[in-house]
C-alpha cells in the first residue's frame, strides 16, 4: 500500500458502539448518519496526517507517523461526535484503540502483533472511550484543558488505577457531555 508510514507508527482502530441497535432505531436514516460519521472521522484523520489503511462497515483502521497526532485525532473525534446533533435523538458513540509499534508493511497493508494489539485494545473499550496501550507516549499538548496538561490530569487521557503490564491498557475517559469538557469539569 503506497504512502503508509513505516518504522514506529501508531495504529488507531475505531468502531461504533451499538451500531445494530442504532440501525434499528434510525431505520432508513441510518445510512445518512453513517455517512456523516465516516465523513467526520475521515476529515479528522486527514487533519492529523492519518493514513486510512482499511475500513469495514462502521469501523476504521488508520496509521499515524506520530503518536501525538493519533491521540489528538482521537480526542477531537470524541469531542466532535459529542457535539454533533444526530437525528431522532440518536447518540453515535465510537470506541477508539491506539497502539504504537513497528508493524510490518506489506503490499496489502500492515501485519504483525502490533496490529492485533491495537484491534484488541479497541475492542476492550466502550463508546466514547479512547484506549491507548500502556506504553503510549503522553501528549505534551495543553490545548485540551485550559487548566492542566493533557496527561495525566485531563479526563480524556487518564490512566486507570492499577498495574500496567505489557498487555494491559491505560484507559482514557472522555467527558460525557460537550459542556463538561469545555468547562474543564470532567470526571
Image: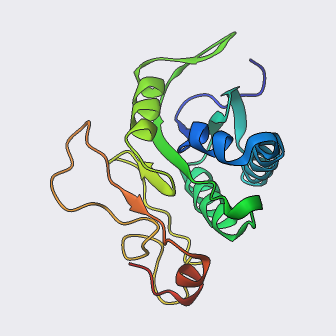
Q: Is residue 160 above or below residue 117?
A: below
Q: Position of residue 80 (x, y in %)?
A: 69, 64
Q: Looking at the image, can residue 15 be seen?
A: no
Residue at image location 77% in from the left, 27% down from the top: 3
- 76 sits to left or right of 138: right
Residue at image location 40% in from the left, 21% down from the top: 113
- 160 sits to left or right of 173: left
Residue closest to the eye, 126 or 30? 30
When asked about the image quadrant of residue 5, the answer is top right
Q: How many marks?
A: 0
On the rendered image, what quadrant is the C terminus found in?
bottom left
Q: Position of residue 114 (x, y in %)?
A: 43, 27
Q: Is residue 71 above or below residue 157?
A: above
Going by the picture, which residue comes out furthest to the left?
A: 163
Residue closest to the eye, 164 or 175? 175
On the rendered image, what quadrant is the N terminus found in?
top right
Going by the picture, which residue comes out furthest to the top?
A: 107
Q: Position of residue 149 (x, y in %)?
A: 46, 78
Q: Is residue 174 above or below residue 53?
A: below
When asked about the image quadrant of residue 11, the answer is top right
Q: Is residue 80 above or below residue 8?
A: below
Residue at image location 68% in from the left, 29% down from the top: 57
- 45 sits to left or right of 15: right
Q: Looking at the image, can residue 45 be seen?
A: yes
Residue closest to the eye, 177 or 7? 177
When asked about the image quadrant of residue 47, the answer is bottom right
Residue closest to the eye, 158 or 181? 181
Amino acid at each position: 500500500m503506497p504512502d503508509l508510514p513505516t518504522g514506529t507508527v501508531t495504529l488507531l482502530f475505531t468502531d461504533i458502539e451499538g451500531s445494530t441497535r442504532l440501525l434499528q432505531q434510525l431505520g432508513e436514516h441510518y445510512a445518512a448518519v453513517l455517512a456523516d460519521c465516516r465523513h467526520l472521522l475521515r476529515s479528522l484523520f486527514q487533519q492529523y496526517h492519518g493514513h486510512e489503511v482499511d475500513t469495514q462497515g462502521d469501523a476504521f483502521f488508520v496509521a499515524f507517523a506520530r503518536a501525538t497526532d493519533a491521540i489528538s485525532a482521537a480526542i477531537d473525534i470524541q469531542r466532535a461526535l459529542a457535539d454533533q446533533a444526530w437525528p431522532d435523538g440518536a447518540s453515535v458513540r465510537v470506541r477508539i484503540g491506539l497502539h504504537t509499534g513497528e508493524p510490518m508493511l506489506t503490499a496489502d497493508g500492515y501485519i504483525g502483533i502490533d496490529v492485533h494489539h491495537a484491534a484488541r485494545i479497541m475492542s476492550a473499550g466502550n463508546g466514547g472511550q479512547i484506549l491507548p496501550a500502556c506504553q503510549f507516549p503522553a501528549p505534551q499538548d495543553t490545548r485540551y484543558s485550559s487548566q492542566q496538561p493533557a496527561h495525566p490530569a485531563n479526563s480524556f487521557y487518564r490512566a486507570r488505577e492499577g498495574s500496567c503490564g505489557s498487555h494491559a491498557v491505560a484507559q482514557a475517559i472522555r467527558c460525557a457531555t460537550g459542556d463538561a469538557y469545555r468547562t474543564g469539569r470532567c470526571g
